[in-house]
Amino acid sequence: MKLKVVLSATVAICLGVSAAIAAGEPQVVRQEEMKKVGGAMGALGAIAKGEKPYDAAAVTAALTTLVEVSKTFPDHFPAGSETGMDSEAAPAIWQNMDDFKAKSAKLTAAAEAQLASMPADQAGVGAAMQAIGGTCGDCHQTYRLKK
């Protein structure tokens, strides 16, 4: 009985350590950040399409997420993190880091501008998405691998 408890505890500790190590990997952090961006854009898209009613708090939260993620996103691309963890990051990021950072800064500026002017209705949210979405597309076309 004691052996089962000890083995179970050992397995649990190993799994916990493995998860903690993976969570600190730049590729994992990048993927988590992109999930946040996807969630924010999804929330805005649902409002813009009329699938959800306009909600100022939801719009503010989504735009704030976009600002926060875009400000630090390039920091999660250190040398040596080019591959692994099913990364969709193109090698071009490390070859042209200044442009990659500039594209992220454009997303920050677009999201900050939309947050400052705060869309007041469904149409405003749609316009905000267009302004922001263009910056996402510019970066993805150049720096995201097609899977």
Image: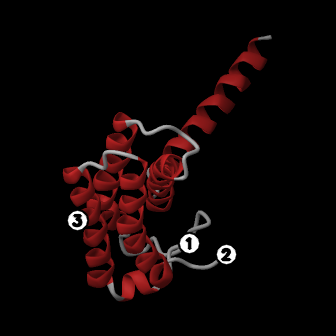
Report x, y in % for residue 18: 57, 44
Above or below, 26 relative to 43: below
For the point 80% across and 11% down, the residue is 1
Report x, y in % for residue 11: 68, 32
The answer to which of 95 and 141 lies nearer the viewer is 141
Disc 1 vs disc 2: Cβ atoms closer than 8 Å? yes
For the point 41% across and 54% down, the residue is 123
Q: Which residue is mark 2?
A: 147
Q: Which residue is mark 3?
A: 109
Q: Colour mode?
A: secondary structure
Q: Which residue is mark 1?
A: 88
Report x, y in % for residue 54: 43, 39
Q: Residue furthest top?
A: 1
Q: CA distance from mark 1 to mark 2?
A: 7 Å
Disc 3 vs disc 1: Cβ atoms closer than 8 Å? no
Q: Is residue 59 left or right of residue 23?
A: left
Q: Is residue 24 left or right of residue 68?
A: right
For the point 42% across and 68% down, the residue is 133
Q: CA distance from mark 3 to mark 1?
A: 24 Å
- Secondary structure under badge 3? helix
Q: Nearer the viewer, mark 3 or mark 1?
A: 3
Above or below, 79 relative to 33: below
Identify residue type, mark 1: Glu
